[in-house]
Amino acid sequence: MNNNLRSERGVALVVALMAMMMMVALGTALILTTSTESKIARNFRNTSEGLYAADAVVERAMDDILTIHDWNDLLNGSAQSAFIDGQPSGPRTLADGKTIDLGEIINYANCQKATTCANSDMDAVTNERPWGANNPRWKPFAWGFLNDITPSGSVNSAFYVMAMVADDPSENDNNPLLDGAPPPPPATVNPGGGVISMRAEAFGPFGAHRILELTLARQAALSTPGSTGYNNGIGQAGVRILSWREVR
């Protein structure tokens, strides 16, 4: 009986099982770490590309804005870029099979909800839109897959981009569909004349989404060499970027 209690038979099996369990745990931890690191790298790559994609549609939209004489046509939605892929509504399928809805994107920009925005929704004072009746009313201007942004098709990207334009909220005319309209008394000067806002959004695989907002101003045509704006040369009117920020 005592000899059986002192027997060491089976100890090797126990040690082997413990060692195997430790190796399994270490292997599982290594796999999880590698998988997590791969996802982090992928997300970083996608978000970085998304920022460049949003900036690319800004550049493309500004090229077309240069050709539009009356900026009120931008604010009421009657003027659009040549870079469009159909109506600014309905679903678009991304490279990973997920879909976005252009109408919902515009609604979220205007009133932070997916459904149609009423005037009262767009005029509501919020932390993101504190200007009341002068809140921007975003109108779609340019939209499509980034691969189609150049005629040559030289861009290779999985992102879908959209640029919207609106009246500058520094205006005080309570009319976001007119640029620089006379303000209601007692104000006599509208500081936002000749200034508009632009919002660019980029959507990519695995939920990548970046947003830029800019403030743009007209740059008068030059008669002599000097400081220039965007695509602004002698005898050519241009556009100047007053501010640029990423919306997080």
Image: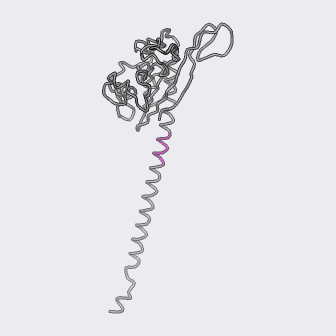
User: Which residue shows up at 49% across the image and 24% down it?
Assistant: 57
Between residue 105 and residue 16, name the one nearer to us. Answer: 105
Task: Residue at 60%, 17% (x, y): give it.
Answer: 229
What scheme was used to colour the molecule? one colour
Instruction: Decide which of 188, 227 is in the foreground and name it.
Output: 188
Residue at 49% across, 29% down: 212
Residue 120, by quadrant, is top left
Image location (x, y in percent) of residue 16:
41, 72
- The x, y position of residue 144, in whole percent, is 42, 23
Give percent across and percent down for residue 245.
Answer: 52, 30
The answer to whether residue 42 is magenta is yes
Q: Quadrant of residue 225?
A: top right
Q: Please name whichever residue, 184 or 51, is drawn nearer the observer in this view of the structure.
A: 184
Q: Residue furthest right?
A: 225
Up-down relation of residue 84 to residue 126 (above or below): above
Q: Residue furthest bottom?
A: 2
Q: Is residue 204 above or below residue 131?
A: below
Residue numbers of the magenta segment: 37-44
The number of numbered discs placed on residues in the rendered structure image is 0
Residue 201 among magenta residues: no
Looking at the picture, how far across and down is residue 217, in whole percent? Answer: 55, 17
Check the image and name the residue furthest to the left.
115
Going by the image, does 116 lie left or right of 179? left
Identify the image quadrant of the N terminus. Answer: bottom left
Vertical order, 234 against 51 (above or below) = above
Main secondary-structure element of the magenta-colored stretch: helix
